[in-house]
Image (cartoon, rainbow, N blue to C red):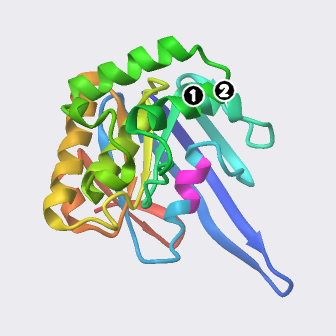
Amino acid sequence: MILTAKNIYKSYKTKSEEILVLSDLSLTVQNSEIISIMGPSGAGKSTLLHILGTIDNFDSGNLTINSIEIDSMNDNSKFRSENIGFIFQFHHLLHEFSVIENLIIPQMLLDKDKFTIKEIALELLNELGLIHLKDRFPGQISGGERQRVAVLRALVNQPKLLFADEPTGNLDIENSNKLLELFNTIKDKFKTSIVIATHDEIVKNYSSRNLMLEDGILIES
């Protein structure tokens, strides 16, 4: 088990009311599986991913990742950088840097050894069939390739847990399938668990489990 969330509550206060987003939510993520989380806009999918990924805090409940209990009131940035990867709808690559530089710069900012990071990045590019892109700039590659490079960027810290928030949102069907096939390769090759928040029905075809977020709780889809 890579992640266990139990009885998670999350609410937001406005001037006039308190809005409950997650209500007594529980989830387990096994090693090396892909989980899709679907639900209407505003259901709290992104909030859930941010909580599970230690970006956002929660009001009450318990969260354990890689056998470590998470205190959501602490600064978990170091833990997050060492254990978790994130992929978003927009690739957020730095256009003035090459693909290989985009992979290594975020880790260098965490004071990690440049040569070790570059070796890992080149190995990832090679193993996942994107080595031919290493010296190109984001403006010189396709949208689908940019999103796949963003996935590799999330893998450079060698996490066992990846969170993807609407990763196919800007892709056509062909590139969506290529991205999801890459997720499956990552799951099998690196024994990584991947949690995907999405509106895209195609994601279900690549998932071990499909969940629906409704009224603040998760149900099997």
Q: Which residue is mark 2?
A: 110
Q: Indicate left or right for 87 with 127 as reference.
A: right
Residue 186 image offset from top left, x and y in percent: 27, 32
Marks 1 & 2, CB-CB < 8 Å contact:
yes
Q: Residue at x 53, y 61 (%)?
A: 46
Q: Quadrant of the N terminus?
A: top left
Q: Quadrant of the C terminus?
A: bottom left
Q: Amino acid at mark 1?
A: Gln
Q: Is residue 58 above or below residue 21?
A: above
Classified by dominant secondary structure, the portion drawn in magenta counts as helix
Q: Which mark is residue 23?
A: none
Q: Which residue is mark 1?
A: 107
Circle 2: residue type: Leu
The image shows residue 129 at horizontal and vertical percentages of 18, 32
Was residue 86 drawn as part of the magenta stretch in this picture? no
Q: Residue at x 42, y 77 (%)?
A: 40
Question: In the rendered image, which quarter is residue 98 located in?
Answer: top left
Work out whether 178 lies above or below 189: below
Magenta region: 47-51
User: Is there any visible trace of residue 190 in the rendered image?
Assistant: yes
